[in-house]
Image (spheres, rainbow, N blue to C red):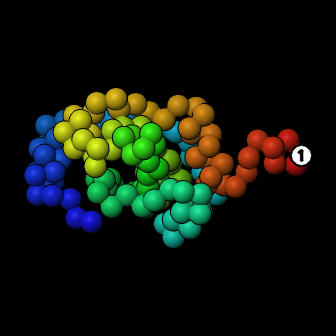
Amino acid sequence: MKPSIIFRLHRLLYFLLKGIGKKEKEHFLFTLEDRLTDFELYTVLADVGWTPNYMGYVYSGQIYQCRRLLKSGRYQLHVRCYDDGRITGHLEVSPEWDASDHLSGVDLRTMNEREATRLKEDITGVTALKKKFK
């Protein structure tokens, strides 16, 4: 699905006015010890309900981005993966729910510790229970 011209123009204006990448540094979650390729990330995350995000802006060094819809599609967890192993993620209003709120950053926040831990478990396959009995 291709974003509408109004959405794309609004997004471009947003990035021109607010600066590209400033907020993304604030959404840092963790760095993977074992780096994965874009296809490996796609494979492990798709298996546990993360879908590719084709509408998000792509930053330098980014190799993959995905999202998981929450609360009947009103919100999304948006994750970006970089070639150096960095993972960033945030919760925000989904663009399908309200494009204006999405681009305005309504309810935007970095993923909390529980969400970040679950994401890391989804990527690595290592859960707290597996760590306990290792």
Quadrant of the rendered image containing residue 74: top left
How many numbered marks, from 0 up?
Answer: 1
20 on left or right of 51: left
Q: Residue at x 42, y 44 (%)?
A: 72
Of the 4 image quadrants, the one containing the N terminus is bottom left
Residue 50 visible within the image: yes
Farthest bottom residue? 39
Which residue in the protein does label 1 denote? Answer: 133
- The residue lying at 46 percent from left, 50 percent from top is 68
Is 19 in front, or is 67? 67
Looking at the image, residue 39 lies above or below residue 125: below
Nearer to the camera, 66 or 94: 94
Query: What element does badge 1 sit on?
Result: loop
Residue for point 28% across, 53% down: 57
Residue furthest to the right = 133
Kind of residue at badge 1: Phe
Residue 38: horizontal and vertical position, in percent?
A: 49, 66
- Residue 27 located left or right of residue 95: right
Is disc 1 surrounded by few (<14), some (14 to 19) or many (20+) residues within 10 Å?
few
Give the residue drawn at x 22%, y 64%. 2
Residue 36 in view (yes/no): no
Which of the two residues, 6 or 109, is positioned nearer the viewer here?
6
Quadrant assignment, res 98: top left
Q: Could you tell me residue 79's position as x and y percent?
A: 45, 48
Placement of 11 over or under 29, stated as above or below: below
117 shown above or below 66? above
Give left or right: position of 119 versus 74: right
Estimate the x, y position of residue 18 in percent, counting from the top left: 19, 35
Q: Quadrant of residue 35?
A: bottom right
